[in-house]
Image (tube, helix red, strand yellow):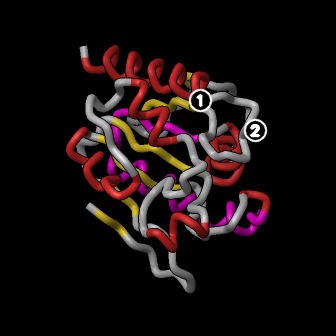
Amino acid sequence: METRETTDFETLGDYLQEGLAIVFVGLNPSSYSVRAGHYFANPRNRFWAALNRSGLVGEELSPERDTELIRHGIGFTDVVKRPTPQAAGLKAADYRRWAPVLRDKLLHYQPRIACFHGLTGYKAYLKYGERVAPQAELGRQERDIGSSRVFVVPNPSPANAQYSLDDLVYWYQRLAEFRAELTH
């Protein structure tokens, strides 16, 4: 379930396996989350609150229970695996190194949906992983990654204050609807 790349820094391992319905793709792990050992561990991050309110999973989960999402067909990975306190700490070299690695992971595991947290991460993936002009908006994307459909939701980071918790819930509900469409 958990994959680890050889790195010269501590990071969060991926929660990936074949047959997942959704893989959430973050921009990169926060230093806080790496220290805690769980995805979206910062209490100011709105991921878990939005996920729990959206009904996407059907039970209340928390960072300490992040590995349980696999039981619901949901995994985690990142565009860049190098942790930073804030996304502004990422460099073009990080994207050049890690976006192709992400592409290979998604092609290998083939989740039904690759759901990117934020346009910044998705556009960086397009530029450095697919080598195409990064054009995108929230929601379903026209471009697939192998057999994986692509969906983009707002980044739940507290730094992304332009989106409220209600906005995040809305986008996770749209993601749930998209998953249901693909299941039928």
Mark 2 nearby-residue class (10 Å; few <14, some 14–19, many ≥20): few
Q: Position of residue 56 (x, y in %)?
A: 35, 27
Q: Which mark is residue 133?
A: 2
Q: Which mark is residue 106?
A: none
The reply to whether dot 1 and dot 2 touch (C-beta < 8 Å) is no
Query: In the rendered structure, which amino acid carries the disc numbered 1?
Result: Leu
Q: List the single residue furthest toward the front.
A: 43
- Look at 51% across and 70% down and name the residue there: 34
Which numbered disc, 1 or 2, marks the residue that appears first in the sequence?
Answer: 2
Q: Position of residue 19 (x, y in %)?
A: 24, 42
The residue beneath circle 1 is: 165
User: Can residue 100 be found in the magenta stretch?
Assistant: yes
Q: Position of residue 119 (x, y in %)?
A: 68, 37
Image: magenta residue range: 89-117
Instruction: Say whether residue 171 is left or right of residue 133.
Output: left
Q: Is residue 173 above or below residue 161?
A: above
Q: List the single residue furthest toward the bottom.
A: 8
Q: List the single residue furthest toward the left.
A: 71
- Look at 46% across and 69% down and name the residue there: 36
Mark 1, mark 2: which one is toward the viewer? 1
Whether residue 16 is visible, yes or no, is no
Quadrant assignment, res 63: bottom left
Q: Is residue 18 above or below residue 1?
A: above
- Look at 73% across and 47% down and name the residue there: 159
Disc 2, SS: loop
Q: CA distance from mark 1 to mark 2?
A: 30 Å
Q: Is residue 4 above or below residue 131?
A: below
